[in-house]
Image (cartoon, rainbow, N blue to C red):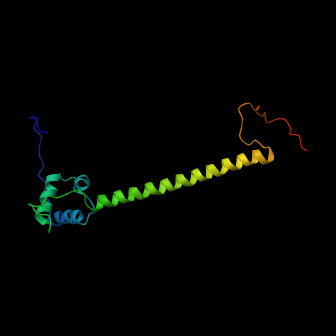
Amino acid sequence: MIKTGKKVRHLRKFSEDFKLKIVQQYERGEMSVPELEKYYQVRNPTIYSWIYKYSDYNKKQIQVVEFKNSQMNKIKKLEDRIKELERAVGQKQMNVDYLEKMIDLAKDEYGIDIKKNSNTPQSSGFKATNKK
């Protein structure tokens, strides 16, 4: 800011190579326009103007839809991760069910109550156990 309270605008000039690099990243689906904006600190309308200027298939008359391959790939990866986690939860639930069944069988067959009851006196840990 200067003394009058006005904000000083800095005019940045970008090379043609830099502009082409951003347009190519967009066209390959590596990044969307909002991602490019955050990564390179270049405003959204500027990036769109470069896309319209340098792109082979994104011209001014064609509306650019932002749902490119990069976003589709991210969604696909997240969906795959959800399936993987659901599969892991299912396996854990099967293990829990198996162990509960084993506890029930131990109680029925051998008369052993493995589950801890609330009325069971706590062990002090100092007394010797009776061996049979």
Return the residue found at the far bottom. Answer: 56
Give the side of residue 24 with respect to residue 121, left or right: left
86 is higher (above) or lower (below) than 56: above
Comparing 26 with 76, the one in front is 76
Please give the name of the residue rendered at 66% of the width and 47% of the height, measured from the top-left corner: 100
Please give the name of the residue rendered at 43% of the width and 56% of the height, measured from the top-left corner: 81
Q: How many marks?
A: 0
Across and down, in percent, residue 68 comes to: 25, 60
Across and down, in percent, residue 21 comes to: 21, 65
Please give the name of the residue rendered at 79% of the width and 36% of the height, measured from the top-left corner: 125
Q: Quadrant of residue 64?
A: bottom left
Where does the N terminus fall, quadrant-wise? top left
Please give the name of the residue rendered at 21% of the width and 62% of the height, measured from the top-left corner: 22
Give the side of residue 32 with respect to residue 94, left or right: left
Q: Quadrant of residue 115?
A: top right
Comparing 78 with 8, the one in front is 78
Return the residue found at the far front. Answer: 108
Where does the C terminus fall, quadrant-wise? top right
Across and down, in percent, residue 77 comes to: 38, 59
Give the side of residue 72 with respect to residue 10, left or right: right
Comparing 115 with 68, the one in front is 115
Across and down, in percent, residue 27 comes to: 22, 65
Give the side of residue 81 with respect to residue 127, left or right: left
